[in-house]
Amino acid sequence: QVQLVESGGGLLQAGGSLRLSCAASGRTFSRYVMAWFRQAPGKEREFVAGISRSGDNTRYAESVKGRFTISRDNAKNTVYLQMNGLKSEDTAIYYCAAKDRTVVVTQIWNYDYWGQGTQVTVSS
Protein backbone atom coordinates (compact mmCIF):
# COMPACT_ATOMS: atom_id res chain seq x y z
CA GLN A 1 0.00 0.00 0.00
CA VAL A 2 1.10 3.52 -0.70
CA GLN A 3 -0.58 6.84 -0.06
CA LEU A 4 0.07 9.79 -2.31
CA VAL A 5 -0.32 13.47 -1.53
CA GLU A 6 0.13 16.11 -4.21
CA SER A 7 1.02 19.74 -3.63
CA GLY A 8 2.22 22.78 -5.53
CA GLY A 9 -0.78 23.63 -7.64
CA GLY A 10 -1.96 27.18 -8.12
CA LEU A 11 -3.12 29.97 -10.37
CA LEU A 12 -0.70 31.63 -12.73
CA GLN A 13 -0.43 33.36 -16.07
CA ALA A 14 0.46 31.73 -19.34
CA GLY A 15 4.17 31.33 -19.86
CA GLY A 16 4.85 30.81 -16.19
CA SER A 17 6.35 27.85 -14.36
CA LEU A 18 5.20 25.63 -11.54
CA ARG A 19 6.56 22.57 -9.79
CA LEU A 20 4.24 19.93 -8.48
CA SER A 21 5.28 17.49 -5.79
CA CYS A 22 3.85 14.15 -4.80
CA ALA A 23 4.87 12.71 -1.45
CA ALA A 24 4.42 8.99 -0.93
CA SER A 25 4.06 7.11 2.31
CA GLY A 26 5.70 3.80 3.01
CA ARG A 27 9.18 2.38 2.74
CA THR A 28 8.92 0.86 -0.72
CA PHE A 29 8.59 3.97 -2.85
CA SER A 30 11.48 2.90 -5.08
CA ARG A 31 9.58 -0.18 -6.28
CA TYR A 32 6.86 1.92 -7.90
CA VAL A 33 6.65 3.38 -11.34
CA MET A 34 5.27 6.87 -10.84
CA ALA A 35 3.23 9.03 -13.16
CA TRP A 36 1.33 12.26 -13.45
CA PHE A 37 -2.08 12.45 -15.04
CA ARG A 38 -4.41 15.39 -15.47
CA GLN A 39 -8.09 15.96 -15.96
CA ALA A 40 -9.55 19.12 -17.41
CA PRO A 41 -13.20 20.07 -16.95
CA GLY A 42 -15.40 17.97 -19.17
CA LYS A 43 -12.52 15.83 -20.38
CA GLU A 44 -11.18 12.41 -19.57
CA ARG A 45 -8.17 11.93 -17.38
CA GLU A 46 -5.01 11.76 -19.48
CA PHE A 47 -1.41 10.69 -19.06
CA VAL A 48 1.10 13.53 -18.71
CA ALA A 49 4.42 11.97 -17.69
CA GLY A 50 5.85 8.84 -16.13
CA ILE A 51 9.13 7.78 -14.59
CA SER A 52 10.70 4.41 -13.93
CA ARG A 53 11.60 3.12 -10.50
CA SER A 54 15.21 4.24 -10.73
CA GLY A 55 14.42 7.44 -12.59
CA ASP A 56 16.43 6.38 -15.65
CA ASN A 57 13.48 6.20 -18.00
CA THR A 58 10.77 8.76 -18.58
CA ARG A 59 7.80 9.12 -20.90
CA TYR A 60 5.80 12.20 -21.80
CA ALA A 61 2.61 13.05 -23.57
CA GLU A 62 3.27 14.82 -26.85
CA SER A 63 1.46 17.89 -25.61
CA VAL A 64 3.97 18.49 -22.81
CA LYS A 65 7.24 17.30 -24.33
CA GLY A 66 9.94 19.93 -24.03
CA ARG A 67 7.97 21.87 -21.44
CA PHE A 68 7.43 19.45 -18.54
CA THR A 69 10.01 17.37 -16.70
CA ILE A 70 9.28 14.51 -14.34
CA SER A 71 11.82 13.50 -11.72
CA ARG A 72 11.94 11.59 -8.46
CA ASP A 73 13.93 11.46 -5.27
CA ASN A 74 13.67 7.98 -3.81
CA ALA A 75 15.40 9.07 -0.61
CA LYS A 76 12.58 11.57 -0.03
CA ASN A 77 9.77 9.36 -1.36
CA THR A 78 8.79 12.18 -3.70
CA VAL A 79 8.10 12.60 -7.39
CA TYR A 80 8.07 15.99 -9.06
CA LEU A 81 6.64 17.57 -12.17
CA GLN A 82 8.39 20.71 -13.31
CA MET A 83 6.10 22.61 -15.67
CA ASN A 84 7.49 25.42 -17.79
CA GLY A 85 5.93 27.48 -20.53
CA LEU A 86 2.46 26.83 -19.18
CA LYS A 87 -0.51 27.33 -21.47
CA SER A 88 -4.18 27.81 -20.77
CA GLU A 89 -4.81 24.29 -22.09
CA ASP A 90 -2.67 22.94 -19.24
CA THR A 91 -5.41 23.95 -16.82
CA ALA A 92 -6.55 20.81 -15.03
CA ILE A 93 -6.46 18.85 -11.84
CA TYR A 94 -3.15 17.03 -11.72
CA TYR A 95 -2.98 13.59 -10.14
CA CYS A 96 -0.05 11.53 -9.01
CA ALA A 97 -0.26 7.78 -9.54
CA ALA A 98 1.80 4.72 -8.64
CA LYS A 99 2.14 1.22 -10.01
CA ASP A 100 4.23 -1.67 -8.77
CA ARG A 101 5.83 -2.70 -12.04
CA THR A 102 9.00 -2.17 -14.07
CA VAL A 103 7.76 -0.40 -17.20
CA VAL A 104 6.36 3.09 -17.50
CA VAL A 105 2.92 2.83 -19.05
CA THR A 106 0.37 5.43 -20.01
CA GLN A 107 -2.95 3.71 -19.40
CA ILE A 108 -4.95 4.84 -16.42
CA TRP A 109 -6.11 1.37 -15.55
CA ASN A 110 -2.53 0.24 -14.99
CA TYR A 111 -2.12 2.38 -11.90
CA ASP A 112 -3.27 1.15 -8.53
CA TYR A 113 -2.72 4.14 -6.27
CA TRP A 114 -3.82 7.72 -6.74
CA GLY A 115 -3.51 10.99 -4.93
CA GLN A 116 -6.36 13.42 -4.36
CA GLY A 117 -5.15 15.85 -7.02
CA THR A 118 -3.97 19.43 -7.10
CA GLN A 119 -5.50 22.18 -9.20
CA VAL A 120 -3.45 24.03 -11.78
CA THR A 121 -5.10 27.02 -13.45
CA VAL A 122 -3.35 28.94 -16.20
CA SER A 123 -4.85 32.22 -17.34
CA SER A 124 -4.21 33.50 -20.83
Image (cartoon, helix red, strand yellow):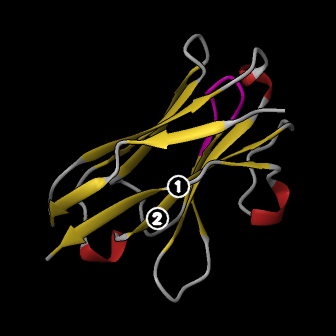
Question: Circle 2 is placed at which residue position?
Answer: 93
- Tell me if 19 is positioned left or right of 72 in this view: left
Badge 1, how many Cα within 10 Å: few under 14, some, many 20+? many
Residue ID at (61%, 27%): 55
Badge 2, how many Cα within 10 Å: few under 14, some, many 20+? some
Residue ID at (46%, 83%): 41
Q: Which mark is residue 117?
A: 1
Residue 120 pos. (x, y %): 34, 61
Residue ID at (68%, 22%): 54
- Tell me if 119 is positioned left or right of 88 in this view: right
- Most prominent secondary structure in the magenta stretch? loop
- Tell me if 38 is positioned left or right of 47 in this view: left
**Residue contact at pointers 2 and 1, CB within 8 angstroms:** yes
Q: Quadrant of the C terminus?
A: bottom left
- Which residues make up the magenta segment? 52-58
Determine the CA span between mark 2 and mark 1. 6 Å
Image height of 103 relative to 45, above or below: above
Count of numbered badges drawn on the protein: 2
Q: What element carries label 1?
A: loop
Q: Is mark 2 on a helix, strand or loop?
A: strand
Residue ID at (61%, 17%): 74
Observer-nearest residue: 18 or 15? 18
Q: Earlier in the sequence, mark 2 or mark 1?
A: 2
Point out the residue furthest to the bottom here: 42
* Three-letter code for the amino acid on which mark 1 is drawn: Gly
Image height of 86 relative to 69, above or below: below
Residue 116 pos. (x, y %): 58, 53
Residue 118 pos. (x, y %): 44, 54
Q: Residue 117 magenta-drawn? A: no
**Quadrant in the rendering for residue 108:** bottom right
* Three-letter code for the amino acid on which mark 2 is drawn: Ile
